[in-house]
Amino acid sequence: MEFLHDTVALSRMQFALTAIFHMLWPVLTTGMAIYLVVVEGLWLKTRNPDYYHHARFWAKLYVLNFGIGVASGVPMEFQFGTNWAPFSEAVGDFFGSVLGFEASMAFMLEAGFLGIVLFGWERVPPVVHYIATILVAFGANLSTFWILTANSWLQTPAGGELVDGKFIVSDYFEAIFNPFMVNSVMHMFLATLETSLFVIGGIAAWYILNKRHSAFFAKALKIVLAVAIAVAPLQIYVGHLSGEQVYHHQPAKLAAMEAQWETIPAGQPADWSLVALPNDELEQNDWELKIPNGLGYILELKPILSEPVLGLKEWKPEDRPHLLGLIYYSFRVMVAIGFFFAGLMLWTVLQWVRGKLSDAEIDGQRWLMRAWIFAAPLGYIAVEAGWIVRCVGRQPWTLYGQIRTADAASSLPPENVLVSLCGFAIVYSLLFLCALYFGSRIIRKGPDLNIPVPIFDRATSLPVKHSPDRRPLET
């Protein structure tokens, strides 16, 4: 229980708690916003009322996630001024600016047009409403860009240098386009989209399995599948590119991800540890199961590596990551879920080609629907596992190679941090329970297929009002 008297450890735990909880909500809003753009576009093109009702139904889950994401995200950023003040003072010129861009550009854009998306169906012309939906989706994903830009810069700082404890930026564009940025943004964008697709698909599968609006939700599943055909394999490929970046820029993190204690020289075959029990104290793995030449194929797509893989023993204990079991297995959980998604996508495509997803046949695909329901929460687990690898594996550095985490924390009484940590745990638990309650309530109630589809005057593009009995009135 020594950590209860350690301000740095408690501050790290508090930030981890708020970040892990907050990440649950924007993951779905960023991906689901793209789905809303797709279904509304299909409605405008085909005038099929099913697509309109899909847009109205899924928007309810979107706004629930958006609200909780805002409530949980603001306290997380406040910690940079409370628990991590020395860090903020040192890197605020760049890191603070990027977080400000996220709030002023992305969040304000998303929040500003969300009201039109939710309440403007019969108040603005269809094109205006669709533009608002596109801008909401753009704002949500622009937020991902700025957040990942800031975090990538922490992983591979660029565009300046640390002078007398303060990072002086000489080139903002070099800092923004740091070595990790492009692949990190793409990896997270695909992760949010893939998670949202399998959540939507899992909810649709639940309705189909329970024979509620089967034909209606079969459309949602097919839209999800059409996008997942590209997203699932692309995510695996981009994940491979991200692993290559860690190999070249953060060798200590790679060693922790693979529980690799000894250096593998260049020109030697590199086995991949499938399962292991890392022992940090003895600097060895108590037990492991290896795949011959596996690491070589993962890193360079060939059995013999052209560059060495440095082992953890190359660094002093205080200069290398710890919590190796957490890093090691988080990485494997993330990878396993990515391949599971690809496999489920292939299985579903096969059934689609065989005609088993038709309105007459889809009710009989009970095991397939169960697999989609099982997959619904897995994307969240993969995203959280990926962020654990990304951030815990960066330790003991906050700004990689330049500012240690121990030097970045504020000098606060540990009991004060413990009280705030417990307070966050209680409040976030209540928010989580509320989200489960209201989310399950929306799903149990299901879509309202009696909502009248908006009718617009062709000459003016203005909405035609409806009478109380839902019949259109002349303007």
Image (tube, rainbow, N blue to C red):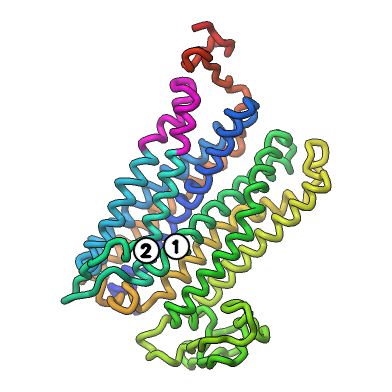
> For mark 2, does the 10 Å Cα neighbourhood hold few (<14), some (14 to 19), or many (20 or more) residues?
some
Q: Are marks 2 and 1 in contact (CB under 8 Å)?
A: yes
- Which residue position is annotated with label 2? 177
Q: Residue at x 54, y 72 (%)?
A: 331
> Mark number for residue 87?
none
Residue 178 position in % (x across, y down)? 37, 67
Above or below 86: residue 64: above
Q: Residue at x 56, y 49 (%)?
A: 196
Left of 402 or right of it: where is 261? right
- The N terminus: image quadrant: bottom left
- Which residue position is annotated with label 1? 182
Q: Which residues are magenta?
A: 112-134
Magenta stretch, overall SS: helix
> For mark 1, does the 10 Å Cα neighbourhood hold few (<14), some (14 to 19), or many (20 or more) residues?
some
Q: Residue at x 63, y 54 (%)?
A: 230
Above or below 165: residue 118: above
Above or below 302: residue 40: above
Q: Is residue 93 visible?
A: yes
In terms of sequence position, does the residue under pointer 2 or pointer 1 come before the other? 2
Tell me the distance, in whole angstroms, between the alpha carbons under discs 2 and 1: 7 Å
Residue 459 position in % (x across, y down)? 50, 12
In which quadrant of the rendered view does residue 23 lie? Answer: bottom left
Label 2: element kind: loop
Q: Residue at x 61, y 45 (%)?
A: 200
Above or below 60: residue 417: below
Residue 72 position in % (x across, y down)? 38, 51
Residue at far top of view: 474
Q: Amino acid at mark 1?
A: Val
In which quadrant of the rendered view does residue 266 lie? Answer: bottom right
Residue 313 position in % (x across, y down)? 45, 92
